[in-house]
Image (tube, rainbow, N blue to C red):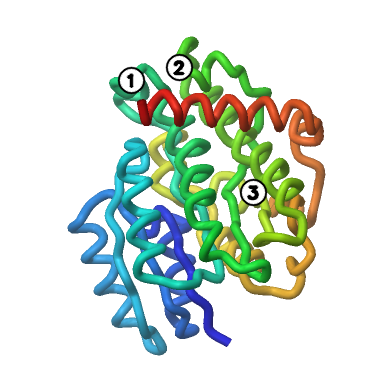
């Protein structure tokens, strides 16, 4: 049975590889990117794949909350139901990590934007749906002052904290929804895959992207993940595992979500 699947960051890396495999299976794909040209090129590439059917592109800069809101509104308007949301888009290293509001781009794109997008899409995500959040083996205790833009971090620390943060809100939302909403699953797709992010950050070619694409598709569609809401899958070890201990602390998760809501209130004011 084919599904309707939204993948953020679909124009390169794991997102593109995942989209290619899903297109070949005839799923309805909503692809996202920041560049109109790359989106158009990606749409054309996917439509050339045997078995591909409906591909719909959406452009949004996830560092801009107004773009995230517009993306969610467009998707809700055009699709009465979405089976899977894969929050794949992410940033590690960038020339200008601090955006004009004083916030760190890594927290906004890797943590806050997927939180907001998920919240806005909950009305069209059924209880049988799934939200797959890209976590990482790199996880570090979140400094709420850094999330709030009051303290700046180096690239590695900002990335690791933002990835623990998405894992923490995944656990919190899964607990809040229980059986009333889609499954919320955090996944480390595997370390040092051959994405542009890894090449820019570490200067290495990286491992086969197919490793990451395969686990995202399994998480999105397979029975193996049918009861995985509120869990973390570590693809470095090929199994469900415990994330950083902070994500297992319900009080810390709640405080993190409150901090994210405060950031959104500030950016929307």
Residue density around tag 3, few if under 14, some if 14–19, many if 20 or more, within 10 Å: many
Residue density around tag 1, few if under 14, some if 14–19, many if 20 or more, within 10 Å: few
Check disc 1 and report its element: helix, strand or loop.
Answer: loop
Disc on the earlier residue, 2 or 3: 2
- Mark sitting on residue 135: none
Left or right? Give the position of 241 relative to 19: right
Check disc 2 and report its element: helix, strand or loop.
Answer: loop
CA gap between label 1 and label 2 equals: 8 Å
For the point 69% across and 54% down, the residue is 235
Relative to 67, is 226 above or below?
below
- In the rendered structure, are the residues bearing label 1 and label 2 in contact, judged by CB atoms less than 8 Å apart? yes
The residue mark sitting in front, 1 or 3, is 1
Q: Residue furthest top?
A: 151
**202 vs 14, nearest the viewer:** 14
Q: Which residue is mark 1?
A: 101
Q: Quadrant of residue 218?
A: bottom right
Disc on the earlier residue, 1 or 2: 1
Query: Is residue 239 among the parts visible in the rendering?
Result: yes
For the point 65% across and 51% down, the residue is 187
**62 vs 12, nearest the viewer:** 62
Left or right? Give the position of 190 relative to 76: right
Residue 52 in picture, x, y percent from top left: 38, 84
- Mark sitting on residue 188: 3
Residue 65 in picture, x, y percent from top left: 36, 38
Q: The N terminus is located in which quarter?
A: bottom right
Check disc 3 and report its element: helix, strand or loop.
Answer: strand
- In the rendered structure, are the residues bearing label 1 and label 3 in contact, judged by CB atoms less than 8 Å apart? no
Disc on the earlier residue, 1 or 3: 1
For the point 53% across and 49% down, the residue is 119
Q: Which residue is mark 2?
A: 149
Left or right? Give the position of 7 relative to 221: left
- In the rendered structure, are the residues bearing label 2 and label 3 in contact, judged by CB atoms less than 8 Å apart? no
């Amino acid at each position: 049975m084919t599904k309707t699947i939204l993948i953020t960051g679909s124009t390169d890396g794991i997102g593109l590889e995942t989209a290619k495999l899903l297109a070949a299976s005839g799923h309805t794909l909503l692809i996202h990117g920041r560049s109109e040209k790359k989106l158009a090129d990606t749409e054309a590439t996917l439509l050339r794949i045997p078995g591909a059917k409906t591909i719909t592109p959406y452009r949004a800069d996830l560092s801009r909350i107004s773009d995230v809101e517009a993306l969610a509104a467009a998707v809700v308007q055009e699709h009465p139901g979405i089976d899977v949301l894969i929050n794949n888009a992410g940033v590690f290293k960038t020339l200008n990590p601090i955006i004009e509001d004083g916030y760190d781009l890594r927290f906004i794109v890797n943590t806050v934007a997927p939180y907001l997008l998920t919240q806005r899409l909950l009305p069209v995500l059924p209880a049988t749906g799934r939200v797959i959040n890209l976590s990482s083996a790199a996880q570090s205790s979140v400094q709420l002052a850094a999330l709030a833009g009051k303290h700046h971090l180096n690239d590695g620390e900002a990335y690791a904290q933002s990835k623990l943060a998405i894992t923490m809100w995944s656990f919190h939302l899964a607990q809040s929804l229980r059986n009333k909403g889609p499954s919320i699953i955090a996944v480390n797709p595997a370390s040092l895959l051959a994405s542009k992010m890894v090449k820019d950050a570490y200067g290495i070619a990286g491992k086969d992207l197919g490793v990451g694409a395969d686990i995202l598709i399994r998480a999105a569609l397979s029975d193996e993940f049918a009861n995985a809401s509120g869990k973390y899958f570590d693809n470095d070890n090929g199994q469900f595992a415990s994330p950083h201990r902070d994500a297992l602390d319900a009080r810390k998760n709640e405080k993190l979500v409150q901090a994210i809501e405060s950031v959104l209130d500030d950016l929307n004011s």
